[in-house]
Image (cartoon, coloured by chain):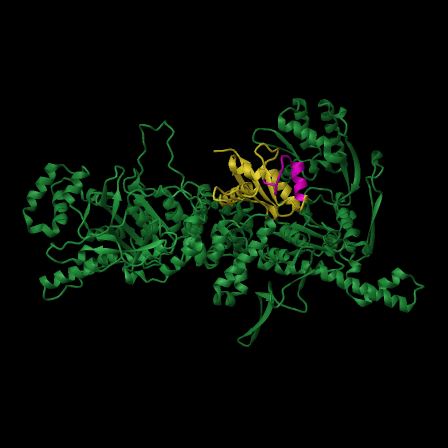
Amino acid sequence: MTKKMEQETHLLKTKIKDLIVDEGFQKKQARLSLGSDATEASVAKETERRMKQARELSAKLVRPLGTSSRPYPMWGSQRSDYNGQSHLEQVLSIIADDSNPMKVYSERPFVEVIAMAYCDMPVPSMLPLFFDGLERRKPESTNRTQMMIGDPGAGKSFMGALQGRMRSTQPVEVFDCGGKNMNELLFEMVLDFGAGDALPDAIDKRLKTGTLKDISLGYISQLNDLEKMPEDVAGKPEAQEEWNKKRIIVTYTDNGTPVIDWKKLGTGTKEKIDNAFEILKKISNIEGLDKAGGNMLGMNSQYGPLIRWFMEGREGVLDEYNKSKEGSDNGLQTVWQFLNGETNECTVENPLKNKDLTNGPSSFTFRREDMQAGFFVTLTGNKTEDGLTTRSLNKSVYSRLSPQTLPDPTEADWQHRICQMMCGVPVSTLYSVFREQADENPKEFGQWLMQLRKAKAELEGVPVPELQETLLENWRSVVNSTRKLARFYSEWSEMTNADNLMTTGNTDLIEEVDEEYAKKEGIDFRKIKQHLEAALPIRPHMLPEDAEVKADFKNFMKQPELAEKEYENPSVAFGTRLVDVLDRMVFEKSEAIGKHKLYEKLKASMDNAGLRDIVLQDGAHSFQRSVEEDLNVSVFDSSDMGKQAAAARKVFCEYIRQVDPQIVEADDDKIITIARLKKSLQAVAEKDTAKTKELFIVNRDHETLGTFPLESVRIEDIALYTGDGTEEIELSVVNHEDFMAALALPTVGAKNLEGIWDTNIRMRDEQIEKENNAGGIDAEKNATADEILRITENRSELGLATTTLRVMFKDAAGEASDVSVHVVMNKNRKKTLVVGEKVPTKLLSAFKEAGIIHVDRHAPNAKAKIEAALNDLTRGTRNQEISKRYLADAFKFRNELDLGEFLLDKKVISSAQLKAARDELNGPAYKDKANEKLGEILIKQGALTAAQLADKTKLSELLVDDKIGMLFEKYVVKDSRPKL
Amino acid sequence: MTDQGYSPPPGLLEKTASVAAQQNAMERGCKFLPHGCRLFPVEQGWESKSIANDENVSVVSTLLQLEEVMKNAGSKLVFIPLDALMTDADIEKICQRNATVRTFFKETKKT
């Protein structure tokens, strides 16, 4: 570090008097420094010098916030006129003032200040306090304190420390005042371990290696009992518990090893330090450490944190000030008078000096002229309603520190904090103030959000987590979903706030929500943290209640062999995980502990807020997306083609390597460049495959795949061949893996899924109908059939669709044959189920990312997986069971089901039962309705029940059956169109 | 670079491994700590080794060392080995009293 740089990082140590750009003030300072004999000319010259210096120093320190080109959000009261009346309202607006912006006096570069100010921005209702804090940190401000009172978890100490962090890279010391004597802020007793903390180091080493003697371990446990419980605490369980928590110095690891908080042990009251000194002396002696050189131990009195901060020109936070020991802050009154600007000088005496031969400073004088730019003290306090240990401060303290009370959080505050936790940026607040610009150019707004997040990540020293990056790219989904989450959290917080039940419409909860419950389970911002922490990691997912899973009882006691781990992008099911966590929390915090009314209200609130899919009263799926859907995002949703190409390249190369042993190239770039793949994806994106019926697969030709990664394929539908069956067609059928790999590619997969639908069956049926029924078709009779037909064409209003394609597949023995790939889709929910053969493992994670559930029809739990997928696909439709039946019927338009053989094969009926039923069917008259009639007869003859028949012929049973052939095959075949 | 093979600059592979390990850990979720600090668990293995060996990462085994690292503006990334003498509650407490942003990677037992 150069000398100049070093000086600039210590600019906050500049005396405030040297920073004030005010001629009158500097003239006064000039006179003071030159003495009363100075001439007017020399005073003028000195004033000029001082003014120049103040301007230069200020220019180096000032970072403007809230200018016309970089507005900063601000919340406050504003008058608005309507209906001829003036109304005072609280609004979220901006500060955009080039002449008088907000100013941060900081040693940090502008970009770091901006990153913190925007990413860590306090919630909207706290912004006026943030603004006030900045004003009080200006050099000309003589009040160098800010006191905030609010509910626990509101973010008071965070905001105080944030202002300090924005100014300097040094940490802001947070002093926990709870249960402490406030005189310690001025002078404190310390254990003196000498340079290098040799004694603590030596003890820690022995603790780590397990070589500390048992008797020493016994003494260490006594370090948690250094002070007597104060009289006003004894007898009050809550206060006692809190006091016990605060005095903990030694914690224990999982294996029982003590951990000593040396910093906490090293400072405090005389009683505490005396006792600690005696214990450590004994340990040192037992361990023989007193004989080793350098392991010194002494005690002393020294300046407390408040004086140190003043001397070092630093910021500090006095946390939970109104939980400090009653009456212990009387000696601080004059100090507060100095710090708030009432006086310019104040001297405090050290009461510890010379007590039992204690050394240390005898007094300290705070002088205005010594005040440095970096000095500031934030005090925080909890509302007095918060527990017994929170006390009301003296009137004199209130009048000197003028505490500012935080307003109760609004829905905008909840949303702001949820966004911050989720994405690292308060997207909702920034969208609120830049709405017009963001709507006009969403991409640019998204890029700006990412820029802010990346600047903050630089400060953190790590990249932006992938989940946050994906969410920021989908910032609209974040705004939508967090709005709903905020409404839910806000209502949850009202329902668990015992003080306000009457005013928030929750009178019916009075019996269930009492003070104690509110204190323990009341919802504050900290709960969002806990819920997100639980939702972030990918955990095992509980299967639906009716999922079919067969346990392997025979080998149950043997450890199972796990399948190859499929990578899962954490953002793909983030929404589902979060909503699952909330479902669980709501139950655990209400119904599980006997609070039925609260549970019912919370469930209703979740439904109203739209956490899960929104189903309207008439049963139709709402166009409003649920929180779950909005937050289940993947790179497939990205509008950035570069990102899609990068993801596609990964799938492409991994697939090629896995299926083609000749490709051993480890460098993806040498197989295909992102730029080239991006060009191909762009070309595919421009195609209207729903019309052109063009599909694309991975080009496996070694010579050309680096230049043309995709090749064009099409569908050859046998339903279009209406001749006498003698036509011969030569087809080059696409192989199963290539077709599947294409579905797992961003853009390509989506375009292929648009291109596989047709109306060929309808055209064929209509032709036959015309020939057989010259009078026309009975529309009413055919309404249901038409809906089912529409499902085969992907034109159903339910959003459901299904079809089957034929592709070539080589089995393990190398035998090639054509196989069916069934596709079931819900376009409203962007969910697809594909049932086929086994696919290369590398494709499985890509399918997840694409929102495609792939099921290998031969897998042992295939049916259960399909059933779960179908439940998910049909969720939100009018009636799930009917929807699934429609899908099963639609499946039969293309696939040939011989019910008798199917049931026989499944061992549901015997061959004798089948024969008897067929005999009753009596000949070919029933040919067209053979399945329907056969089912009826089987039931009538008691071979099986109607429920059994329905269960055994449900769609999941049909989809896994590889013996079901097709009535009209749809082959995916190679095409002669140029490669892309 | 030659046709025979590519020789990466010294330390590049180690650095890449550390960054990959950090990203993997960040994808698995975190514990939010006071003042914007985050703690990412890292299973014992190549990932924890790569992070521990990264010269940009400070390795701390005791609370005294952790307290020091919090005061050093240059130590943005902190690795806590499995045998470190501290609990999650201790880390949280130290973050609470030293308001500064640090990213922690804490080694955990292999499951």
In the rendered image, the residue lying farthest to the front is: B3
Residue B101: % across, % down: 62, 48
Above or below — where is A556 with respect to A513? above
Chain letter, colour yellow: B
Depth check: A377 or A670 in front? A670
In the rendered image, the residue lying farthest to the right is: A37
Is residue A389 in sight in this rendering? no
Residue B69 within the magenta-colored segment of the rendering = yes
Task: Give the colour chain A carries in the figure.
Answer: green
Extent of the magenta region = B54-70
Q: Image check: A784 left or right of A14?
A: left
Residue A791 within the magenta-colored segment of the rendering = no
Above or below — where is B20 with respect to A683? above
Q: Image check: A657 left or right of A333?
A: left
Q: How many marks?
A: 0
Depth check: A209 or A297 in front? A209
Residue A131: % across, % down: 65, 60
Residue A256, quarter of the rendered image: top right
Residue at the image point whose x is 17% and y is 51% from the top:
A967
Depth check: B48 or A808 in front? A808
Residue A330: % across, % down: 77, 48
Above or below — where is A283 with respect to A459? above
Residue at the image point whose x is 47% and y is 53% from the top:
A470
Is residue A712 in sight in this rendering? yes
Residue A452: % across, % down: 56, 57
